[in-house]
Image (tube, rainbow, N blue to C red):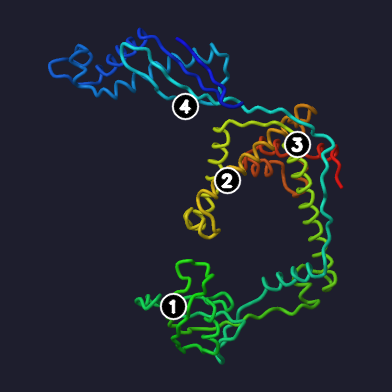
Amino acid sequence: MQITSEKINPCKIDLTIEIEPEKVAEAYNQAYKEFGKVTSVPGFRKGKAPRAILEKYVAEESVRREVADILVTQAYPAAIEQEKIEPYADPEFNVEELEEGKPAKFKASVPLPPKVELGEYKGIKVTKTKVEATDADVDLEVKNIQDRRTTAEKVEDRGVQETDIVIAEISSNVDDGPMCEPKRSLIQIGQNVPGFDEQIMGLKPGERKSFELTYPDDFEDEALRGKKSKFDVSVESLRERKAPELNDEFAKEVGGFENMDALRAHIKQQIIEFRENESERDVERQIVEGIVANSEIHLPEVLVEHEIGHDMQEIQASLNRQNLTIDQYLRNVGKDREEFFKELYESAERRLKAGMAMGEVSDKENIDVKDEDIDAEIERLAAESNTTTDAIIAYMDSRGGRATLGNNMLNRRILDYLKSVSVVK
């Protein structure tokens, strides 16, 4: 057996394996022997037909595939041992030459483990965003709370107004096509085709109106851009939004605050805490990106593909919950498949390289998490949540168990260390 190796990149090596004609002949004989055990040949019991006769009853390509499997199974382990290769995953095989009586030639593309040459990880310079919360930020959050507590009360003695929610039966067509069947719909003023709201203003429950509109050239549904559509709207009921007044009583109902000033102070502090956490995460991201940029990190393609597969499972599960297909999702976000999978690949690669770099830092600085550290964290979580350690363990078991908790703790320790040796401005 002759072996030629070619290093394609740090995480991939190609082996060209040439096998002697005698071994090829043995593999052919073995393949026909195996087929003989399961092939019916008139006049012979299974396994007893001579090869010359059996050949007429077995497809040549089937035999070729079986021979290739036999030779690869025998030759590949010997080849990687001879070349002193430690594969990261199963190789891809390609049969280049295979004919009985001649040498056989195979190519094995072998993925190798990730390669990490850690660069400088101390003294990384990063910038921390200054955190603040303005009165406008607080006003916006107060408005969001008010909107969540806004009710919709039925009204019958007037027509549609700008703040209403309208229940109506609507039918429509496109470019003089047939009208669709009327459909009971919820209409929120301000969220419709331009011109639609103006047409139904003043309509009372029980009233009906037909009108035509032209979809704008920048309409979100490209298929409707510039098209004319006839609408037939029959108003069934109206509901008027009733927002609670922003006063001290509102503050008490929201969270037991003494007055609006106290509520606003609480909201401001929450915004600052949230933005402070975001700022810290951004600092950590900058540090890890700096370390990755300083390092030489190579990943086997199969590892990135596995990570993408995991990401796709999560995305698909989310789309299933929303009753969306991947194509519908891509239309909603304005991306094609090529762009989507390119971003998915880059995200997976970036995440894996960050993990590799942090793992190297952990090894160099002897940062670890012991079983007793995990036990202490479980007890801390139980005390913080005013529950039992058994309840915390049961919750953890549904989310990856101790291993996930330990990994999260290790990542936190690595990041805390890296921040302590970085220059944060």
Mark 1–mark 3 contact, CB under 8 Å?
no
Mark 2–mark 3 contact, CB under 8 Å?
no
Q: CA distance from mark 1 to mark 4?
A: 56 Å
Does dot 4 land on a helix, a strand or a loop? Answer: strand
Tell whether 193 sits left or right of 407: left
Which residue position is annotated with label 3?
A: 291
Mark 2–mark 4 contact, CB under 8 Å?
no
N-terminal-most mark, 2 or 3: 3
Mark 1–mark 4 contact, CB under 8 Å?
no
Q: Nearer the viewer, mark 1 or mark 3?
A: 1
N-terminal-most mark, 3 or 4: 4
Mark 3: which amino acid? Answer: Ile
| Few, some or many residues within 10 Å of mark 2 (<14, 14–19, 20+) | some
Q: How many marks?
A: 4
Which residue position is annotated with label 4?
A: 92
Mark 1: which amino acid? Answer: Lys
Q: CA distance from mark 3 to mark 4?
A: 33 Å
Task: Give the label on residue 228, or none.
Answer: 1
Q: CA distance from mark 2 to mark 3?
A: 22 Å
Q: Nearer the viewer, mark 1 or mark 4?
A: 1
N-terminal-most mark, 1 or 4: 4
Which residue is painted at 27% across and 15% down in the image?
32
* Viewer-proximal residue among 337 and 198: 337
Q: Residue 234 is drawn in which quadrant?
A: bottom left
Picture coordinates of residue 105 (x, y %)?
41, 17
Picture coordinates of residue 49 (x, y %)?
19, 13
Mark 4: which amino acid? Answer: Glu
Picture coordinates of residue 379 (x, y %)?
76, 40
